[in-house]
Image: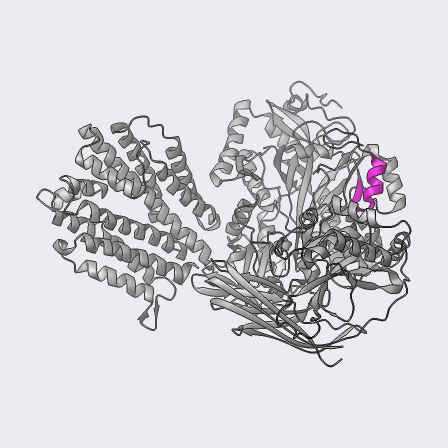
Amino acid sequence: MTVGVASEHDPVAALIRGYRVPPGVSDEMIGADGQPRPVWRPFLQRFARLSAEDIARRFNRGDRYLRDAGVFFRHYREEGSTERDWPLSHVPVLLAEAEWKQISAGLRQRADLLERVVADLYGPGDLVRRGMLPTELVAGNPAWLRPMVGINPPSGHFLNFVAFELGRNPDGSWFVLGDRTEAPSGAGFALENRVATMRAFSDPFPHGTIHRLSEFFREFREVLQGFDSQPESRAAILTAGIGTETYFEHAYIARFLGMMLLEGEDLVVEQGRTMVRTVAGNKPVSVLWRRMDAAFVDPLELNDKSQIGTPGLVNSIRSGHLSTVNALGTGVLQTRAFLAFLPRIARELLGQPLAIPNIATWWCGAPKERAYVQAQSHRMTIGNALAQDLPFEVEDRTIIAGRFPDGRFADISEQLAAQGGGLVGQEAVSLSTTPVYEHGQLVPRPVMLRVFAARTAQGWSVMPGGYARIGPSGDATALALRRGGSVADVWIVSDRAVPADRFSTVDRQFQRATPSLLPSRAADNLYWMGRYVERAEGLIRLVRSYHMRLAETGVPDDPRVARIASYLKRTGISLDQPVPGEILEQLRSAIRCAAKVRDRFSIDGWLALRSLEADIAGARVPMAGDEAARAMSFMLRGTAGFGGLVHDNMYRFVGWRFLSIGRALERAQAMAWMLADFAAPTAPEGSFDIAIEVGDSVMTHRRRYLIETNRNTVIDLLALDHRNPRSVRYQVSSVRRLVAELPGAEVNGELSELARAILRIETRLSVADPARLDTDRLNATARSLGRISDLLTRTYLT
Amino acid sequence: MLYDISLSISYTYAAPSVQARNVLRVLPLNRPNEQRRLSGEVSFEPRPQERADWTDFFGNAITEIGFQQPLTRLTVHLKSRVERMARPPQLDLSPNRRRLAEELAAMPGLAPDSPHHYLAPSPRVSFDASITRFVGSILREGGTVLAAMCDVGRALHREMRFDAEATDVNTAPSDSFRNRHGVCQDFSHIMIAGLRAHGIPAGYVSGFLRTEPPRGQPRLEGADAMHAWVRVWCGAELGWVEYDPTNDLMVGADHVSVAVGRDYSDVAPLKGAVRSSGGQKSRHAVDMVPLAE
């Protein structure tokens, strides 16, 4: 079908002139009449007026947002993860509100049906007994979790958040490719796609008629928080951790909704109650929005090999103290072979056919169906009956139109005879196409929509939008989507202005949220992030001093140059490279910690760390000496920038205190060790100056003491001065003040063990005489700061 | 036959555990016409802060315990008196395999004792081509399921060498079969894998076995460990029949069953989650003493 017969002067006609919808499929933008669908016209009229440069600039704006927000496409393999730019196709998929209403109604019906099915599978088991579902598809299904049989979900429902994969038939009707009921992902990415797409299509593109997404999430949060009336209990998000592909999304939703992001090790079960281990002790949790597969949440009753679960969690659910969303075991509904039976179950249970049919599926365990699949194998995909993934995700043993994926022909009758009930045949389907902007023009690409539904008090609420996945080529068969491609926003467009977000805070009563809890693991990561960044900075300073002396003297065996080198060597730093690898290692350790607390750490702070890493990793310093020293100074500006962010921008949540304690302790301890060495009686001439320089206090020293450096002035300025942020005492005082604000630091006027210990160190430094603070005492101070770290860890971080 | 059974399992942790939570399946089962638990008590040293008792999907008795304070050692004691009824010798009323499939198809359902739970691969029993082939070579065309069970059990006993040191609790059936050695767990898993692959429902039973002492000698205290064997569904008429491939015998009055499931993972006597940085050592001791006969 070729489109565009309008006049030369019509920019829309010009825009779509070359847009050729593949034969035999429908298209989102172009209707059956070959003209743009009405819902697209306002968008196209504006788009058609943009110059190529304009478009590039706008798309760039969207991409920059995604990069700055840290949205990357992560691919996890055994050898580690890779990251590439988020593959946003900037042109959204537009759907008319009227059509959307029909889709939503169909999906609500389907969600209700799935709830009935899963409630039966974990309850009376009538569907199997009456032969509506083959026994072996349940009894032999790893996703059917026996420990959950007979447990009624405390919330009253098994399903609370589901997703559906939708495609459009050549005749324009919609069909379901698969149900996502375990822990559907993509809703958070849909939000990010929306923000980025809106950046690209800001004014003059009309926004007032596009349904907003945020209300859907906020409404769902209220539902989660309403599960349990006990005021002290909480709702949180449970993630499998940083190793999962969708971790970014978990962190994003947690931040967006202000919910705690927890991992299995954050939780502990006590007397049947699930508790989160926080810096203020164990606190109850009553609802977990589960973003990890059910089998892994409890090694005691489910997969006993799980390292990421919480022992006893199932029993906490059994005793009615904990709800998970969705209930454990709902993943069984994703079983591919179920699609063969849902149409009949719908007629039976609901008394009506499915409003939106699902992909035609035949289970090969029944003789008639098996014969049909064999006869029609040329237009079928034959795969694992118990597979949980979507039809276009292909395994090695999948047979597509008679062949294995590697091209070999399959002996269909042999396969069917050998495996029978282990196989399903699914009709090879084609999808509709949607426009993608490529090389200066719009081209049609196959598209599939993931649509989300959340249970509210009023029933299922369908998110007005979705997560569109777009195939990489013009091939419109669903299978094309397995070869990568792009993603896009979905706009549900009304004829009128859509009502404002009723959760918007504009008209609402001002309300401060109760401070959220800080899990011990998160605090631990923040603390160590602080320590690692500071440690990197300390190293850079020492190495810079080395290079500056080297540049000055030109001889590596100058006693002062050798002194720094030997000090570094004793702390495990080799100077074989102008920029020692240990600096980057420390920084990467900090980034690993930061990655685990993305929900609690500012995007700016994250970007500052990443750009510092890039600077250090990319530093090309062939020459020791002056050049290296200058490179080090450049890096120090980066660490100073990070420090400034932490100091000036971060809200003083409890987490900030742990980050700051980490920095202060690290700095105090490193300074004490360094002074013990460089201010020792055996130190060569010039060592005092090195200490002052590493301590960034050259100017201060000149102004404060009208004499040359001597041991007393150095110790006074770098160990005891309460106004010098580089001194041991200054940092110890900071730690003391920060510790005083931690939970339980003072109970009924009595200081905690930790608070007493740090106060003791501070007091000793406050009354110390520089002449008597010798190397032994400095070493003892450094060691006592190490004990503070142990005590802090024991008290708050485990 | 009446038995007094005692079991003790102790764990010693190299570093004190931070938190410990365990699930135990050690109490003998009650099964109509087969065995009756007259008494049974599970106790712990030290005493756990938390304890809950319930039965799992398959009807096995579970005790869950939790400790909030660090542990360096944990000991579990079981004391139970059990009456074991000897099963009278049976005629082989079991169907052949084709007929078995029809019987299975005629009884859909997910009830805990349904043979349908025991047909598919399970967490510790995946199908293995060489086991499937081996069992296939034993099965006789048109033979009954009961005969198949005995033939396969006997063949495995002949083929495999009992070796308490060669495998551990995590050894896959394919590995122990390839090396032709193992303990009761390996014998049972291999037999289950082979029967299931040929459409015969087979499950795993854990329990206690009385070891007959040599004539004239006192019984060795604590010489036995917990044992495992296989149950096979021999059609609607006969139902479940049990076979001990390690000792090559039909299960009778010398066996007391504790838990049934698809494989070891469903019946493990002690599943534990101990948060501890160090390793752990364990010791088991079992006594099954017949009272007056």
Q: Residue furthest bottom?
A: B292
**Outermost residue, front direction?**
B216
Q: Quadrant of the N terminus of chain B?
A: bottom right
Q: Which span of residues is magenta-colored?
A: A411-425
Taking B36 as reference, is A651 left or right? left
Residue A250 point in image, percent of width and height: 55, 49
For the point 33% across and 50% down, which residue is it? A663
Name the chief secondary structure element in magenta: helix
Residue A633 visible in the current orientation: yes
Residue A598 falls inside the magenta stretch: no
Which of the 4 image quarters holds residue B168?
Answer: bottom right
Looking at the image, residue B187 sits to the left or right of residue A739; the answer is right
Q: In the picture shown, does residue A306 fall above or below A200?
A: below
Foreground residue among A121 and A226 = A121
The picture places residue B203, in percent across and down from the top left corner, at: 75, 59
> Is residue A609 positioned above or below A278 on the image?
above
Question: Which of the 4 image quarters holds residue A654?
Answer: bottom left
In front here: A83 or A23?
A83
Q: Is residue A517 above or below residue A667?
A: below
Q: Is residue B192 left or right of residue A681?
A: right
Kindly identify the residue that appears in the image at 24 percent across and 60 percent down: A761
Residue A157 visible (yes or no): no
Q: Position of residue A163 (x, y in %)?
A: 67, 48
Identify which residue, B5 or B270, lies in the foreground.
Answer: B5
